[in-house]
Image (cartoon, rainbow, N blue to C red):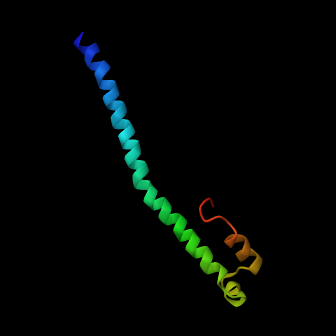
Amino acid sequence: MTLEFDAIFETPRNALRSKLRRTVRWGRGLPAAVEHWLTKRRSRCRLSELTDEDLRDIGLTRAQATAETSKSWFWS
């Protein structure tokens, strides 16, 4: 009887711990994801400011640069 009683009350505790671990992992990953999005946004803004000569130096055309800068900084 003791094993059944312990098993009944152990399950919610483990579920709570599991949920807490998932929340902590998500919380730790969120700042990194935001930093990644902001880095993409900054680099695309800088790309849009380059001259045609600068773009040629890095091997891009104006059309390629425009296509890249028109992408969403959040999703892609």
Query: Which residue is most to the left?
Result: 2
Which residue occupies 41% across, 52% down? 27
Quarter of image, res 21: top left
Left or right relative to 43: residue 1: left
Query: Which residue is most to the bottom?
Result: 53
Left or right relative to 35: residue 52: right
Quarter of image, res 57: bottom right
Residue 68 x, y percent position in the rendering: 69, 71
Query: Relative to residue 48, is residue 34 depicted above or below?
Result: above
Which residue occupies 53% across, 70% down? 39
Which residue occupies 56% across, 74% down? 42
Report the number of discs. Answer: 0
Quarter of image, res 65: bottom right
Query: Relative to residue 6, is residue 74 depicted above or below?
Result: below
Residue 29 x, y percent position in the rendering: 44, 55
Query: Which residue is most to the right?
Result: 63
Residue 71 x, y percent position in the rendering: 68, 66
Left or right relative to 49: residue 14: left
Query: Relative to residue 21, is residue 66 depicted above or below?
Result: below
Quarter in which the C terminus is drawn: bottom right
Which residue occupies 67% across, 72% down? 69
Query: Relative to residue 23, is residue 54 depicted above or below?
Result: below
Residue 44 x, y percent position in the rendering: 62, 74
Quarter in which the N terminus is drawn: top left
